[in-house]
Amino acid sequence: MPLIAVLEDDTRRIAEMKSATTVQAEFELCFFNDAYEMTKWLSSNLNSVSLLSLDCDLDATAITGVECGSGENVSAFLAQHIPKFPIIIHSSNALRAPAMHMELALAGCPTVMLYPFFDGKQWGEDVCKALNTGRSSVGT
């Protein structure tokens, strides 16, 4: 089953993403709430991923007191490894999310899409669109 890796720490967003029917039936979802853990996992599993979805800001640091990094840490890793799969940045951070997008696009990552997160249904549609198009695009 194709694998989608997601960096997200908001339990409400995770629940919405898991319930996205178009995604849930076709893909295995693997969630991370720590950018460093995701990067470590990606270093061994990069070829197993069909799509990656990144949030920028992780509130887990404030909650747990343990530094969890951000989507910027993962995008920096990806920019050095140029993955073959599409990447969605599902963050509404108006400054840092576009910077992540630019870093990945300039590195030559094949598909980078920037979408603010509205709901799980829209996210699921964006995932399916990214997996079907295979072209670089930016959405708002």
Image (cartoon, rainbow, N blue to C red):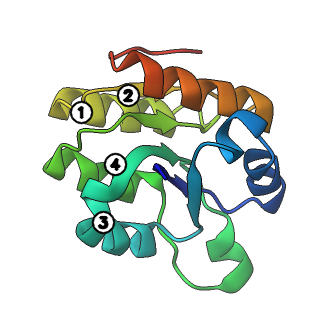
The mark that comes first in sequence, 4 or 3, is: 3
The residue that mark 3 highlights is 45
Residue visible at 67% across and 32% down? 123
Amino acid at the residue labelled 2? Val
Q: Residues within 10 Å of mark 1 (few under 14, many from 20)?
A: many
Compared with 109, 25 (above or below) is below
Q: Position of residue 26 (x, y in %)?
A: 60, 42
Residue visible at 48% across and 35% down? 88
Circles 2 and 3: CB distance less than 8 Å? no
Residue visible at 37% across and 52% down? 49
Q: Position of residue 85 (x, y in %)?
A: 32, 38
Kindly report the distance in space between the C-alpha atoms of the residues bearing marks 4 and 3. Answer: 15 Å
Amino acid at the residue labelled 4? Ser
Circles 1 and 2: CB distance less than 8 Å? yes
Question: In this orientation, does residue 119 appear?
Answer: no
The mark that comes first in sequence, 1 or 3, is: 3
> Disc number at residue 112?
2
Return the residue nearer the eye: 83 or 48.
48
The residue that mark 4 highlights is 75
**Residue 105 placement, left or right of 55:** left
**Which mark's residue is nearer the viewer, 2 or 3?**
3
Indicate the secondary structure of the residue bearing disc 1: loop
